Image: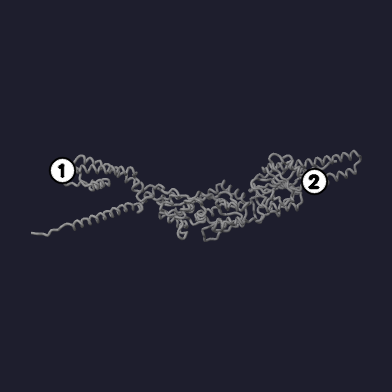
Amino acid sequence: MNFPPPAIIFDGCQKENLIKHIIRPSLLHLQTSIGSSMRYAIFFSIVLFIIWCNLAKGFINVRIIREYFKEKMVNFASIVGCFNDDEKFSLVKSLGFGDQKISILNVKDPQNPHYLTTQHHHIGVVVDGDCSRSDLGNFLKLSGENRLFDVKHHWLILSGEANFSETFNNVELYINADISVMFPWNSTELIIQDVYNPASTRGGRLKKRIMGYYNRTDGYNIVEKEFKYTLRRDMSGVTLRSIIVLPIDFNETLEDYLNNDSDPHINTFNRFHYSLLRPCVAYYNFTSNVTMEKSWGYLINDTSFDGLVGALERKLVDYGSSPLFVRADRGTVMEYGRRTWTLKAAFIFRNPKSLGSADIFLKPLSTSIWVTLICTSGFMVLILRYTQILEKTRIDRTSDTTWSYLLIGATSVFCQQGLGINTPSVYSGRITVLVLLILSYLVFQFYSASVVSNLLIKPKALIQSIESLLKSPMQAGCEDILYNRDYFKYTTDQISKQLYEKKILKGDNNSNFLVPEKGLEKVRDGGYAFHVELATAYPIIKDTFPETYVCELNELQMYRTQPMHANFQKHSPYRDMFDTCIQRLAEYGIIYREIKFWHPKKPECVHSKAKLNYHIGIDNFYPVLCLLAIGMIISLLVLSVEMYLNFKAVKNTVVFPFTN
């Protein structure tokens, strides 16, 4: 008698198959056979086949599961089915190898989602697909509601029926699901079928794809080697919801504004992020329903978030079309994806020439040189005094030998205004005057050249920290945008708090929160530092600042450069899908191209133009005028005293009447 070949599949030796294909035909044959020896031989063959079938069943079960775990590289696994105690013991004994941690679950247990939940490690889930369909349907539906069909759960369903995947029609599935259904193709092979739904709650349809096969020779063999999200790129029929944050108003419809790339310095990084996600929407072939908000998402009464983060928290949208800063409070209600934009903001100001009014005139010479010159000049005046006295006693008795006369003469020599005194007749006096003239010439040349060069070259940055800005007389302001106000509200940096209280806050608490155009206009006028995002500031500076002013600009960061990331719902099934797309955009250079367009270059300082067009302003010259005013005031005071003393002397003089 020829027995049908045993099916080498998970359920190939089920009781009903055994009865249908082996036992029943064998019994009929026994009834019609001749000879007891033949009956015994057939009966013995049936018993051997049953024993072999049971052994083959256990061997194939273990082999399939082990190869699947190896393929998915998991060390934690759960096997879900309708097993009795002996079967559970056999499975644990067969699969408990190495570091593998195995748990056996009953398909009817309502606590299964709790057992299968994992926060960190990946887990393999093997399901006996030949249990009761109603029990399996309830189990799969409950698993979908608890988001267990994700990237951390690798599902293997072993079924004897090719249409088992239809059980997932009412299950919550998404594009990130990793489900393999294995069913018999013929007597020697199993088909491996990939099952997923792009978005079951957003109009998606269940999709199936043959990924490979399994047999005793080749084992677990995946034929489709392409990346998961490449194979699943067609999400037709799915509509995902999103929000973009646009704090600055515009006069077009939202769709027209987002598709228009003009004025890239307005709502810069929000429009950049949206334009970056557009190729992803086209690549995955889904529809994106985008609405607008004014806030990225900040805590309201320390309980919930507004804006984009609030919508993600309440699951009103699937992903954000604006990037977000990484913050601990936001991380509890949403998830971050790949970094797309780096926000750099800084105080922009025209570098002051000097922190002190007389620095420009005192700076060329150090304090020690000034002291040396004064001492040398005093010594030479002393020598001239003695030579003039000697000359007066021997030669010219009418020459002026007063200290003030000699001091004025020495000062006129240093100022290149002439000798100012009569040339001495004695040789010692002439030598002194000659040395004084040579010294004054050398000092004057060096001093004047240093003053001129100090006016022409770009001055050294005298304000190099927030603390020095706080101590300077310069006024300060901030771009009127939510993340700046939020920074001052929650920062723990004491210097920033003092700057906010002393320079930014005014009577109405808003006077120094300005739009970029107004704030940079004050920077152009001088004496003002404005904190603004650099991508917003650079185009305005390029269009409105003279070349000479561009060379005077300095930047001072109040907080470090902030990376901004894509953002999704907590446990979002779309995060890996978008991250994969954004990574490909980076590899192909598209992100680099978009950043070059949306983030303008810093305006360059053309030094030749700055020197040719340089003008000395009153801010450079007023110390000289102050010195002149002080001299005039002192001279008037001295004149008043002299007039008073002269008047008093005349009044006290006795006048005798004229007599002939």
Name which of mark 2 and mark 1 comes first in the sequence: 2
- Which part of the image, by quadrant, shows the C terminus? bottom left
- Residue type for callout 2: Gln
Q: Could you say whether the residue bearing mark 1 is in a helix, strand or loop?
A: loop
Around disc 1, counting alpha carbons within 10 Å, would you say few (fewer than 14), some (14 to 19), or many (20 or more)? few
Observer-nearest of 426 and 215: 426
Q: Determine if residue 69 is in view.
A: yes
Left or right: where 131 falls relative to 626:
right
From the top left corner, tell me how far across and down residue 623 is, in percent.
Answer: 33, 52
Q: Determine if residue 280 is in view.
A: no
The residue tagged 1 is 395
Q: Whole-Å distance between the Cαs marked 2 and 1?
A: 144 Å
Is 629 located above or below residue 63 in the figure? below
Observer-nearest of 414 and 457: 414
The residue tagged 2 is 14
Query: Which residue appears at 24% of the width and 43% of the height?
Result: 382
Query: Which residue appears at 72% of the width and 52% of the height?
Result: 110
